[in-house]
Amino acid sequence: MRSDGARYARRTVQRSLVRWVCALVALMALLSCHREQGGLAAVRARGELSWGGDIQGGEPYVFDDPRRPGTRVGFEVDLAEAIARELGVRARFVQNDWANLVPSLERGTFDMALNGLEVTPARTGRVRFSRPYFLYRMRLMARTGDARVRADVTSLRGLRVGTLGNSQSHDLLRRNGIEAVLYEGQEEPYADLERGRTDAVLLDDIIATRYGVVKPSLRVVGDLGDGYYAAAFRPADESLARAVDDALSRIARSGELRAIMARWQIDDPRLAQIVDWTAENQAQLLRTTERAVFGWSHVKLFAEGAWATVRVSIGAMVLAVLLGMLLALTRQYGPRPFAAVAVAYVEVMRGTPVLLQLYLLYFGLSRYVQLSPMTAAIVGLGLNYAAYEAEVYRAGLQAVPKGQMEAAIALGMPRGMALRRVVVPQAFRLALPGVTNDFIALLKDSSLVSVITVVELTKQMTITAVDVRSWLLPGLTCAAMYFALSYPLSRLSRRLEERMARS
Amino acid sequence: MIELVSVTKTFGEKTVLAGISATFDDGAAVSLVGPSGGGKTTLLRCLNGLESFDGGAIKIAGETVQPGGERANRAAFAKLRGRVGFVFQQFNLFSHRTAIGNVIEAPVHVRGESVSSATERARQLLAKVGMEEHGHKYPHELSGGQQQRVAIARALAMKPEVLLMDEPTSALDPERVQDVVELLSGLKGEGLSLVIVTHEMHFARAISDHVCVLHSGSIVEQGAPREVLSAPKDPRTRAFLGLE
């Protein structure tokens, strides 16, 4: 009896477990339904091919038509429309940050990524590339008078070379142990090269032609290799990829591909190779795949990034604390016009994005002041946070009882001395928990300085994430490092608050 | 000698001091009494320039203070504040410094004395006010009476000729008032002049040589405490003392 009962109970548990698992599987199938939307049949059914690109990549890829803002133009727009026409559907553009085109493709944001995606071994293992639609060269540029830079990668040893992160040029520089300065836009690398912040720029020839060659103080040194742009698909969407391969083949053989390139002034006799592209060519192109694995060497790079984060944060905080105190004192005790300036400073710096301030400081003012990226990062964040510190101190100054100042004056102290010896030290103590909080916030905000080419912890994480084709492990490691830096600070802040509450 | 010559002060429409004239002898203890809002504390604060006045003049510790506050009297205040000590009603000890730290602050940073000699003297002063045990403590660790003693020691550290005190008994337990009377009597015996604002008539009687009754910004009666506090002539004083 008892054993029967036990068996019955076990069976019920098993049955309900099975039911739960079934429900879970059904739910997951339901949730993942939208990820199966690709494939040729789905695209045809929707009558639409969605494709991802970044208009910030600029001319001549995909960009906003300056004459008709809001309209996308570029050789890739023309190409996408030609492909869609061949498939018998419409093309729909989806704006997506360039660095994240592949992850977005994978999670199903669009059917096809088509935006100067270079066929690199790292990407080949992850996405299904179409046959190439463009052959580019990695073009090296330097300042006109600089003879150190030659059309040979070894001549770059010991020099600073600007490029875009995770591009084939970036890979080439890294493989040869050359210091790469990473930009997020295409104009800035050449502007910085002109001003001497870097010694050379290595980027695709299309970019060099549009943004570099037009600057008279720069010269083309030569090309360090070439590569292909291709459209990228999810490996599961093989039917769609094959259809697009066929479409591209027709577009190329009919002469339309080179006509499109000619329209954008990037046609080149060497493109004939792409028109006559064969299955062997494709197999050859995709032969080398490489799969980097997240490991100790990455953790070491992360530690270097964390060190940059710490340097930027501490430097900026020291500046913010000193300038913030000066602003708060001026606002509270200074003559009226100076106080008004202090108020205006606080309002303007708090009321505009720190990202914009960093851009203006580093790129906007580069004609007048030449700051190194690290200096600009410290000064930019420091000037911004000074506005917040000023408010924290103002609250601290107001919390010091008036009698403290009077007592100091009654003892014969001049006002300045009374502030310095009596009021400010007490205000600082009152403000300390707030200051510690701001420092924690600054530690995290310091990731913004990657826009001015400082490779700190978050930037290092994004570079690594693309290399190892995963955001999860690098992301968690990065988060753990930020936490290791900020947690002791938040403990300190708590302790200070408790001590303050006691006295 | 402290001499007040028709000191006036208005605050908007309100007259706070309506032409105060008086002379206080060196080494005397003077009490300023009267109803709230009569101008006692304002007058006291004018004596060391914490408050400005609009007319008349004040001669104190060998300096003459003119109307116009800080700006008009910079030189006078610089000399005067070392010679005129002030003990606040709430004591206003520097809360980020120990008792010793409070006492040496001005000698070291205003007078330029060495820390070691200032500290030595601070210990003597704290012993004098009965606080020798508490030199290392912060203000928040001290009782009201103890804070007052440190505040007195802090003022004495500048070797003043005159000590101004605002309501010295208000923060004390009644049984401690006698201690303050004894402490102040001792200081007076060493030649220190005292000007004290107080509400406490027993205290005024015990400590003062001279009492001024202020009413609506005027001195309505002054003289020895025996006369003024026991047999006042002015009806306003009699009303204030509850004799009518």
Image (cartoon, coloured by chain):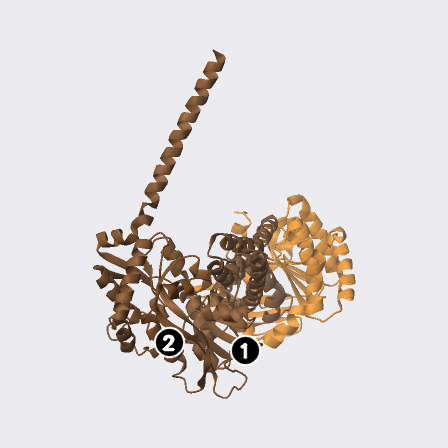
Chain colours: A brown, B orange
For the question of whether residue A194 can be seen, the reply is: yes
Q: Is residue A24 above or below residue A251?
A: above
Chain to which the residue tagged by mark 2 belongs = A
Q: Nearer the viewer, residue A156 or A119?
A: A119
Pick the front one: A225 or A400: A225
Residue A206 numbered mark, or none: 2
Name the spot of residue A469 as percent of width and height, x first: 46, 57
The residue at 57%/50% (across/down) is: A494
The residue carrying mark 1 is A156
- Compared across the picture, whether A100 is left or right of B29 comes to left
Numbered disc 2: secondary structure? helix
Pointer 1: residues within 10 angstroms few (<14), some, or many (20+)? many
Q: Amino acid at mark 1?
A: Leu
Q: Position of residue B97 (x, y in %)?
A: 67, 58
Task: Estimate how packed mark 2 is, as few (under 14), some (14 to 19) or many (20 or more) residues with alpha carbons within 10 Å.
Answer: some
Q: Nearer the viewer, residue A30 or B135?
A: A30
- Whether tag 2 and tag 1 are in contact, CB under 8 A, the answer is no
The picture quadrant where one finds residue A436 is bottom right
Horizontally, is A113 left or right of A303 in the view?
Answer: left
- The numbered mark 1 sits on a residue in which chain? A
Foreground: A284 or A119?
A: A284
